[in-house]
Amino acid sequence: MFVGTPLDSSSTCPVQANGPDPKSPDSQSDGPSSSSPHHSPPCWATQAQSDLAQAREELRQIQLRRATEIETVKRGVERAILGARREEKRLLERVEQDHRDTQQRLEQVERENMAAARVSQSLLEQRSVSMSVIDGSSQEHKRGREERGETALVELEEEVDPLLMEITASGVQLMGQFGRQGSGRADLTLPSGIHATSQGQLFIVDCGNARVQVTDPQGNVLQQVSSPNISGSSRRCRNYFDIAVNAKGLIALSCAAERALLVFSRHGRLLQTFGGSTLGTAKDELEAPRGVAVTRLDEFLVADIRKGTLIALKLDPKTGSRLERTVVTGFHRPYLVATCLSSGMVAVSERGNETGRVPCIKVLEPSWNTVRVLGVCAGMGPVLTSPWGICIDKDSNILVADWGEQHRIVLYSAQGVGWPIVRQGLSSPRGLTLLPDGQLAVSDSMHHCIKIYNYKG
């Protein structure tokens, strides 16, 4: 008979039942045993094996975490190295760009100096010829006066330079005007930029009414263009500035308040917006567009006063999206811009500032080289105080609306000096354009009207 010890239900290690004592007589059996006894490992050995397995698992987890941390640190170091290389490359590119810009400015100054020297030399030669003619005629008059017993001094005081006679006789006349202050269909309030198409239509920036008026030369309204709200500003605060229309009918309108160039279809539907104060301005986008014109390649030429550049944009005629872009640097606060479709010449007005920069007009060849600087030397024509609208006639003469002591229109001859052609009747002239028949249209801002002069360009 076997006597067993009861197992504790809470014990994890089972207890082997006591068998008969082999030395006891009762343990003797008549035959061999049918099975040999099996012994389980002790409780401490089982616990040790469990602890060892757990330790191995923890070690494996630590190794995994270490490998992950090493990989993370490695990736971080690689990113830091790549970032440092990119920053180094960006700095090098910036230094190279600054060097190129400086070189371009130096070349621009050299070209301007050469252009000024050529003009000065031409002016001196013209004056020398004029003085020779005057001296010859004066000597003849002196001999005649002496023969008649009159003094030569009076004759010299009355002698007039033929160039001044030409200037005096070159004034233009007001042919008509249209528009009045208001917000009605045919009204204008503070008209700004103005553009004439080859068909004789006038596109007028009606700044105070935040719209574009399209009229004929008599002022009959043909169309009105306005844009939807871009950045939450009211229509009255958009400050539309200048306008141009290309041969495909696309309309480019600069907006100073939005810092954007708006492109419309010929029917007045907004197609594209370049720049914009609410958008993240990309490096190659506009920052502060002002003057707009159309080149002989039918591209829009935009003056960016903040970037100091001219930007030529070739646009898709259907969508208005940008196809090509050319940037011309080297300007100081470029404001208004004008082009000549026949010669390809470009004129740009620059604003003065308190650091010694004076207002002027720069004249460029189609290859973007500056050939003349106007409005800074009294010997070559009137010194400009506040140039606004500009245009170029077919003979490459430059016309400028200037706010000086007198609000006037100044003409700078393509070969000679400049002179005022309109001295009276204007208050803050902002835009100039030439109609197909050669008449000059002026947006007279503070008089809230458009005036047509009989200038024949």
Image: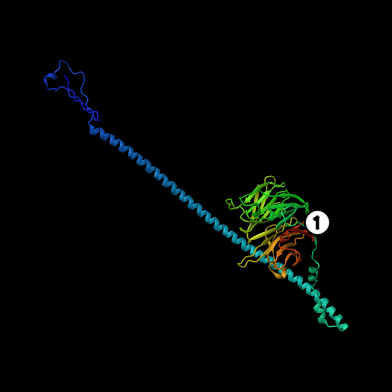
In depth, the one of 85 and 318 nearer the eye is: 318
Q: Is residue 88 left or right of residue 212?
A: left
Percent across and percent down for residue 311 are: 65, 55
**Furthest residue in direction bottom, as rendered:** 149
Residue that extends furthest to the top in the rendered view of this protein: 30
Circle 1 residues within 10 Å: few <14, some 14–19, many ≥20: few
Relative image position of residue 410 (x, y in whole percent): 74, 65
Q: What's the coloring here? A: rainbow
Residue 298, percent across and down? 71, 51
List the residue tagged with mark 1: 437
Residue 294 in sight here? no
**Quarter the C terminus occupies:** bottom right
Label 1 element class? loop
- Residue flagged by tag 1: what amino acid is it? Asp
Horizontally, residue 422 falls left or right of residue 70, namely right
Quarter of the image where one finds residue 306:
bottom right
Instruction: State whether residue 308 is above or below residue 250.
Output: below
Q: Residue at x 74, y 62 (%)?
A: 399
Q: Which residue is drawn at the image coordinates 80% and 56% (left, top)?
A: 437
Picture quarter with the N terminus: top left
Residue 251, above or below 442: above
